[in-house]
Image (cartoon, helix red, strand yellow):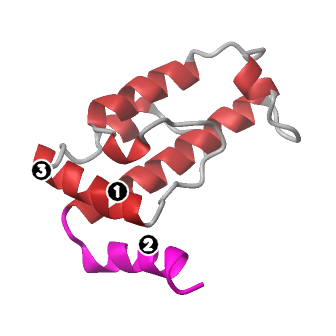
Amino acid sequence: MPYIRTQFEQLPEDASAQAIESTAEGLERYHFEPFLILDAPDFIHWRKKDMLAEYDRLTTLSPDAPELTAVVGSTPSQVVEKQLGLLLYHYHLLCRLRTDDASAWDVVHELYEDD
């Protein structure tokens, strides 16, 4: 599925700075690290503007960019598409965590506590 910038523009507006920080603190206690193909430093503090900037960065990367060619078994365009999808999934989860959505926290608990 090709991801388009509109999908990133339609992300929820940012939570309050306090909600972002308290969620990040809670996730840090679990050593939470979302599963992504490419590095997304400090993802748990990202805001909508960070997601838009990352979309723009990824979609303008040269196909021979080292971070794309380092992924074995996928073409650069596949890497970008997969990364965009994973970013959307994890950011939506992060937004739900920031609103104290109990089912979103259940996902984190299941991944980090129940195993």
Give the structural element (helix, strand or loop) at label 1.
Answer: helix
Q: Residue at x 44, y 66 (%)?
A: 30
- Residue 103 part of the magenta segment: yes
| Sequence-first disc among 3 and 1 | 3
Name the residue tied to disc 2.
108
Residue 99 occupies quadrant: bottom left
Residue 61 occupies quadrant: top right
Q: Position of residue 98 (x, y in %)?
A: 23, 59
Name the residue tied to disc 3.
18
Give the Cα distance between marks 3 and 1. 14 Å
Magenta residues (range)? 99-115
Q: Quadrant of the C terminus?
A: bottom right
Give the structural element (helix, strand or loop) at label 2.
Answer: helix
Q: Is residue 100 visible?
A: yes
Above/below status of 45 relative to 60? below
Kind of residue indicated by mark 3? Gln
Q: Residue at x 29, y 64 (%)?
A: 97
Instruction: In this rendered view, identify the residue nearer to me: 18 or 100.
Output: 18
Which is more foreground, mark 3 or mark 1? Answer: 3
Q: Is residue 16 visible?
A: no
Instruction: In this rendered view, identify the residue nearer to me: 88 or 17.
Output: 17
Q: Position of residue 43 (x, y in %)?
A: 42, 42
Kind of residue indicated by mark 1? Leu
Q: Residue at x 39, y 80 (%)?
A: 106
Above/below status of 4 relative to 17? above
| Sequence-first disc among 2 and 1 | 1
Give the Cα distance between marks 2 and 3. 20 Å
Q: Position of residue 50 (x, y in %)?
A: 35, 30
Q: Label 1 neighbourhood size at 10 Å, few (<14), some (14-19), many (20+)?
A: many
Q: Position of residue 73 (x, y in %)?
A: 88, 41
Q: Label 2 neighbourhood size at 10 Å, few (<14), some (14-19), many (20+)?
A: some
Label number found at residue 94: 1
